[in-house]
Image: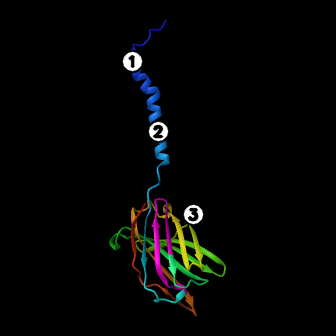
């Protein structure tokens, strides 16, 4: 016959078999139910009338989330075609921007196309990445693009600066809103 444990030794056994698994389960549920980190967003207004209406960026709104970044530009009178370049400068200022991501959204008669070009120390290369989406909304006169943070080479930066440029060929010449606009500085959510 096996001896019975003393009454005082049951407490640690009960704690280990009941309370510890319950505590671990509760902690896991809290982690899973916790809301995601809040994305940081902001907007900036640009000079109205400094480009032809269909390319004239008048405002930029950016949401820099933990998993994706979304740019939305409001255009004075969005047309049927053009090229909008959404720019993500790594780092908080010009001195810290050796890497620049340029997400191009182009609309032609054939439809909408996106392309990512990443510049590191001045050299640019096209970079394929799944999950990039874009929307061209003439009724609202907006162009928007969403890109997963994983598209940024290596670990996404904690923060960056954002801007938008636009251009198109008119009568054989490039025109657009290419004056360096004010950039929006945001931390990643």
| Residue at image location 37% in from the left, 67% down from the top | 91
Compared with residue 188, is residue 1 higher up or lower down, i.e. above or below?
above
Residue 143 at x, y percent in the picture: 55, 76
Give the CA separation, mark 3 to mark 1.
57 Å
Q: Earlier in the sequence, mark 3 or mark 1?
A: 1
Extreme left residue here?
A: 95
Q: Is residue 46 left or right of residue 94?
A: right
Q: Earlier in the sequence, mark 2 or mark 3?
A: 2
Q: Quadrant of the C terminus?
A: bottom left
Question: Which residue is identified by label 2?
Answer: 26
Give the CA separation, mark 1 to mark 2.
26 Å
| Residue at image location 42% in from the left, 75% down from the top | 122
Magenta residues (range) = 54-72
Secondary structure category for the residue under label 2:
helix
Rendering colour mode = rainbow
Question: Which residue is identified by label 3?
Answer: 131
Q: Is residue 111 left or right of residue 22?
A: right
Is residue 66 on the magenta stretch?
A: yes
Secondary structure category for the residue under label 1:
helix
Question: Which residue is identified by label 1?
Answer: 9
Q: Which picture quadrant has residue 128?
A: bottom right
Is residue 69 on the magenta stretch?
A: yes
Residue 174 at x, y percent in the picture: 52, 89
């Amino acid at each position: 016959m096996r001896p019975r444990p003393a009454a005082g030794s049951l407490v640690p056994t009960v704690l280990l078999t009941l309370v510890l698994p319950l505590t671990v389960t509760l902690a896991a549920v809290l982690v899973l139910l916790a809301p995601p980190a809040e994305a940081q967003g902001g907007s900036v207004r640009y000079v109205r009338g400094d480009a032809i209406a269909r390319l004239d960026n008048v405002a930029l709104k950016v949401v820099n989330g933990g998993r994706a970044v979304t740019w939305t530009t409001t255009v004075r009178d969005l047309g049927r075609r053009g090229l909008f370049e959404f720019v993500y400068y790594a780092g908080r200022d010009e001195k810290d921007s050796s890497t620049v991501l340029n997400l191009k959204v182009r609309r032609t008669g054939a439809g909408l196309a996106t392309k990512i070009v990443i510049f590191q120390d001045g050299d640019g290369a096209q970079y394929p990445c799944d999950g990039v989406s874009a929307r061209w909304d003439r009724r609202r006169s907006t162009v928007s693009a969403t890109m997963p943070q994983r598209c940024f080479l290596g670990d996404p930066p904690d923060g960056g600066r954002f801007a938008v440029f636009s251009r198109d060929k008119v009568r054989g010449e490039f025109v657009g809103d290419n004056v360096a606009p004010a950039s929006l500085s945001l931390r990643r959510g």
